[in-house]
Amino acid sequence: MPDIKVTPLGAGQDVGRSCILVSIGGKNIMLDCGMHMGYNDDRRFPDFSYVTQNGRLTEFLDCVIISHFHLDHCGALPYMSEMVGYDGPIYMTHPTKAICPILLEDFRKITVDKKGETNFFTSQMIKDCMKKVVPLNLHQTVQVDEELEIKAYYAGHVLGAAMFQIKVGSESVVYTGDYNMTPDRHLGAAWIDKCRPDILISESTYATTIRDSKRCRERDFLKKVHETVERGGKVLIPVFALGRAQELCILLETFWERMNLKAPIYFSTGLTEKANHYYKLFITWTNQKIRKTFVQRNMFEFKHIKAFDRSYADNPGPMVVFATPGMLHAGQSLQIFKKWAGNEKNMLIMPGYCVQGTVGHKILNGQKKLEMEGRATVITGTANNVIPHLASTLLDVKLQVEYMSFSAHADAKGIMQLIRMAEPRNMLLVHGEAKKMEFLKDKIEQEVFVRCISCYMPANGETTTVVTNPSVPVDISLNLLKREMALGGPLPDAKRPRTMHGTLIMKDNSLRLVSPEQALKELGLSEHQLRFTCRVQLHDPHSDTDTLGRIYTHLKSVLKSYSIQHVPDGTVIVESIVIKVTSSAEEPNLKVILLSWSYQDEELGSFLSTLLKKGLPS
């Protein structure tokens, strides 16, 4: 039997470093190629030695697909293509292709220029990597080769994010990347066809969460920000350059305008302009409201939000700052945090998920003392546990910390919604924590969907094999459908399989089911009647005629809904079934009952032969 193999090299029972290997119909596809925010060692990138111990990856991969521009989904791409070695096609949407190299270069600057790391990809490698990218449009079916085709669907989440359907013959896999089933202030909700893939590979970041009302969350966010600036405090909101940043900027801009507030709002230098440029360029990817009002007013040109300069962090008085990156693992957001952490009037609002190992994750878990040593960040519970180190400082976290999820990931309800939308045969969870995945896995397997769904959650390096039952598409003639309906059968329903009788014609690599009469006419053949016969022996002291009469009476009592005839020529007829009785002169009490039926009544014929073998009632 054919099968599909799925192996996570990253994001298996973990969030970050998304990289999934899929083998389908003899083709090998890599889905995403991300880095892990929580590590600065070899664990930062996926272990590509799983694909090959030596040599380039080109020989082993048919294509690479990148779902969106976040670094945990594309951060290892130049390392994979230029340092490990891959020359094949890399597919992504147009917005992802435009934004991806900018974020990769920012990541490289922080890692190499500021932290001084070596053995890292260069600016030239990013450029060479992007030359291998093949951009595609939503709902465009791309033929990778003669057998492998891919198609992108809108995923919400961030500008340019897409879910991908991968098909080889009749086998298919859908990979969601990160997606959001709820529309927000600047993007629409994810959507996909009822494509019924063999496997739906879904993120499960918020596998156990059902988020509260978005309106309540926004009101709570604005209240916290307003209260902090009113008491003279500073608010730090760590964000990634594109996505939640624009969502929260639109929210604060509207609120500042309505309340006529004067406290300054800043955004990391340069990123506002870049974001604005790309939202203008790819306006069709935003939601309906923004597209409608774009001609009169660009929602991303902010009156109250200005570019941030490092020196502003030391300014007295209240302010709100959006700074990158979103998990406080490096960069400007971490530098500002260090300056503001010691003042209890200040506030840190974390609007999204933080990967384990990042400073953001540790603060959200209640750590009140951080040891900042040189270029690394180490958490300690108490001052007594500090390992003495040159240039290390112990930082007291006194500012208020709030976690308000404005994350653009699907929650448990959204994941179930996507399952109902796509109707997969199997489910595979990635990009989530093991315990939360386990909970969602049980929920999916217990839920009543159109069909029972098996759910898998492999760890990194673990292969899940799913056996597929290839479906063969068959066209049915209109005359045959009309005849079935005329016989009183139920109307055709895609959700309820049913048996149909007809003749299967294979012509020009396509299959059609037609009525036998139409098949004979088309093929120029004469009809042959195929009948089944069976002999049943039983002892009965009566004459042949009386035995046949007793059979007729017995069948009338058993088969009340059938038409049963006792014909003068010495036969009993039930539908197409003919029953006769004979006996030999040597042994007149031993009767031989002959049954004959057409293939349409095979089930009834088998039932009658079994019934008569049991004998007649006395």
Image (tube, rainbow, N blue to C red):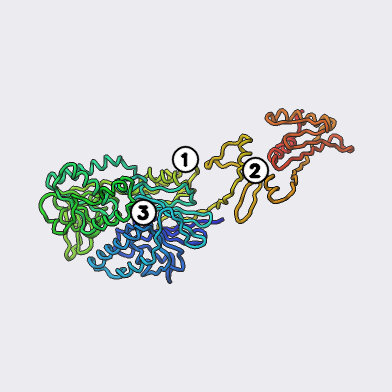
Check disc 3 and report the residue beneath it: 161
Residue 367, percent from left and from top:
22, 52
The residue under label 2 is which amino acid type?
His
96 vs 549, nearest the viewer: 96
Name the residue tied to disc 1. Answer: 448
Name the residue type under label 1.
Val
Quick check: 65 left or right of 369? right
Picture residue at 58% right of the left edge, 36% below the top? 490
Marks 2 and 3, how far apart at CA:
46 Å
Outermost residue on the left side: it is 316
Q: Earlier in the sequence, mark 3 or mark 1?
A: 3
Q: Is residue 291 left or right of residue 447?
A: left
Query: Residue 325 location, x and y as percent?
Result: 25, 57
Front of the two marks 3 and 1? 3
User: What kind of residue is marked 3?
Assistant: Ala
Helix, strand or loop status at disc 3: loop
Q: Which mark is residue 501?
A: 2
Q: Quadrant of residue 70?
A: bottom left
* Residue 216, placed above or below residue 463: above
Secondary structure of residue under mark 2: loop
- What whole-number distance in Å separates the C-alpha atoms at marks 3 and 1? 30 Å
Q: CA distance from mark 2 to mark 1?
A: 30 Å
Q: Is residue 469 left or right of residue 262?
A: right
**Mark 1: few, some, or many residues within 10 Å (few <14, many ≥20)?**
few
**Earlier residue among tags 2 and 3:** 3
- Does the rendering let one see residue 289? yes
Q: Secondary structure at mark 1?
A: loop
- Dots 2, 1 in contact, CB < 8 A: no
Tell me where residue 448 appears, x and y as whole percent: 47, 40
Q: Position of residue 152 (x, y in %)?
A: 42, 54
